[in-house]
């Protein structure tokens, strides 16, 4: 049996947002590896072994998946959203460093609908012009880097999508981010809080930066800040295509 | 008959990257509206009218689609990739301005796999850390805005994805962008040219900024510039999850 490894994105939650390419890989897999809630989205079947693991063990998980593929298994590493956006693809490539044997394996990345694009679609089109995408978690980078990025992004005129805005363990980070953004962008800039996008718990709320509070976000929320031209039309929010 | 409008993303080209949500909308549609090559990707069937139109008539196309939905048609406006990323969603919302009658319609945006995510997946994971996404076309914004954005993005430490890097009508823009990026990021920064991603014509090439030439890109190319930590591992290129 020839093993392979697919690093696949399950999209934000709704099964209708899982690509046929990912569904096909899951149908052929012998093993599915990933964070507990993502593996729980894969239906069990005979011949398929599920390997759920806890958060923050990404590198161990990547190595375990590569070991299995090297041993001839057909392995899918699952991420929510897209595997290349703050998810498992980088961890797998990090695990490949210094391992030419693993580098020779059949490894594919299968893209998925990342949370910010599903959130933008649910809200309208706030990312319809140039934008950036920032992980607000300071687990893997110092806060000073995040603040510098926010200021440059504001001065560049980007709309911004924020992943991991807020967790119980570091509730103060997002409050600091909002303060920085208010300073750079003013009180009237529109900001959309998109929680649990595409699931039955979905909630989309657009307010101004003046009205935004840290409590509006949790770890299931993607936050999208508009650019200076982002506006409401009816129940939607969108960024125009032109810069005047 | 109750009309509706879906603004749908067909993904970058491969049918296995079209979401089931989008396929379902197309199966229920009476009318499909969009740029000629994108409408050509929808299979004709009895009861479905295809409305292909030329490039650069986005607003007229959006209005025509809204007129049909208001008249009771089930209309899908198709874009390549994701409709919210430099595509038709913003044009439809622009067409809604000042038209409360149209704003009351059933309008949904159906996300798709945008080109940069498919390109990143084909290359490895170059967008695995904070990144930005810039449309290099200066049809809808002055070049000075593009240059300012490139400089801020470089100083923020973002990886960067570039859409519409080069066209026959303005070949000099991308050369200027490369010069600016060399100045800001140095000659060794990795840059991936991803042409016709997920189609039979796909070609992925990663070089350094010193080696990059404007001719490596055309209008079917998405260009991804790594951040300062982006590196090769085996045949892949990826951005590590951590900032040291």
Image (cartoon, coloured by chain):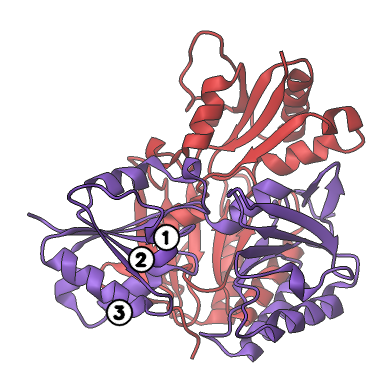
Chain colours: A red, B purple
Q: Report the label total.
A: 3
Q: Is residue B191 left or right of residue A153?
A: right
Residue under label 2, please give it.
Answer: B34
Work out how far the residue at label 1 is from the one at label 3, CA to CA, in angstroms.
Answer: 17 Å
Work out how far the residue at label 3 is from the one at label 2, CA to CA, in angstroms.
Answer: 11 Å
Residue sticking out furthest to the left: B1
**Do marks 1 and 3 share a subunit?**
yes
Marked residue nearer the N-terminal end (1 or 3): 1
Q: Is residue A125 visible?
A: no
Q: Residue at x 49, y 69 (%)?
A: B86
Badge number at residue B68: none
- Label 2 resides on the chain identified as B
Residue under label 3, please give it.
Answer: B60
Q: Is residue A71 visible?
A: yes
Badge number at residue B38: 1
Q: Is residue A120 left or right of residue B154?
A: left
Q: Is residue A93 left or right of residue A207?
A: right
Give percent across and percent down for residue B186. 89, 72
Give percent across and percent down for residue A113. 50, 47
- Label 3 resides on the chain identified as B
Q: Nearer the viewer, mark 1 or mark 3?
A: 1
Mark 1, Cα crowd under 10 Å, few <14 / some 14-19 / many 20+, is many
Residue sticking out furthest to the top: A46
**Do marks 1 and 2 share a subunit?**
yes
| Relative to B212, residue B151 above or below | below
| Relative to A2, residue A105 above or below | below
Circle 2 sits in a helix, a strand or a loop, which is it?
A: strand
The quarter in which the N terminus of chain B is drawn is bottom left
| Relative to A93, residue B181 above or below | below
Q: Are marks 1 and 2 in contact (CB under 8 Å)?
A: yes
């Amino acid at each position: 049996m020839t093993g392979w490894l697919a690093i696949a994105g399950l999209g934000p939650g709704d099964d209708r947002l899982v690509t046929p390419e990912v569904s096909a890989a899951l149908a052929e897999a012998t093993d599915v590896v990933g964070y507990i809630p993502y593996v729980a989205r894969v239906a069990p079947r005979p011949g398929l072994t599920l390997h759920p693991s806890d958060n923050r063990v990404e590198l161990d998980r990547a190595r375990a998946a590569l070991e299995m593929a090297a041993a001839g298994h057909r392995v899918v590493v699952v991420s929510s959203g897209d595997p290349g956006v703050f998810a498992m693809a980088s961890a797998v490539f990090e695990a490949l460093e210094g391992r030419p044997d693993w580098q020779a394996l059949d490894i594919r990345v299968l893209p998925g609908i990342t949370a910010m694009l599903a959130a933008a679609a649910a809200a309208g089109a706030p990312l319809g012009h140039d934008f950036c995408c920032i992980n607000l978690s300071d687990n893997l980078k110092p806060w000073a880097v995040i603040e510098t990025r926010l200021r440059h992004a504001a001065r560049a005129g980007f709309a911004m999508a924020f992943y991991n805005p807020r967790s119980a363990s570091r509730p103060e980070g997002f409050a600091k981010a909002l303060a920085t953004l208010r300073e750079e962008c003013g009180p009237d800039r529109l900001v959309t809080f998109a929680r649990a996008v595409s699931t039955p718990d979905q909630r989309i709320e657009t307010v101004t930066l003046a009205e935004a509070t840290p409590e509006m976000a949790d770890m299931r929320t993607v936050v999208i800040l508009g650019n200076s031209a982002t506006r409401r039309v009816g129940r939607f929010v969108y960024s125009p295509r032109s810069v005047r």
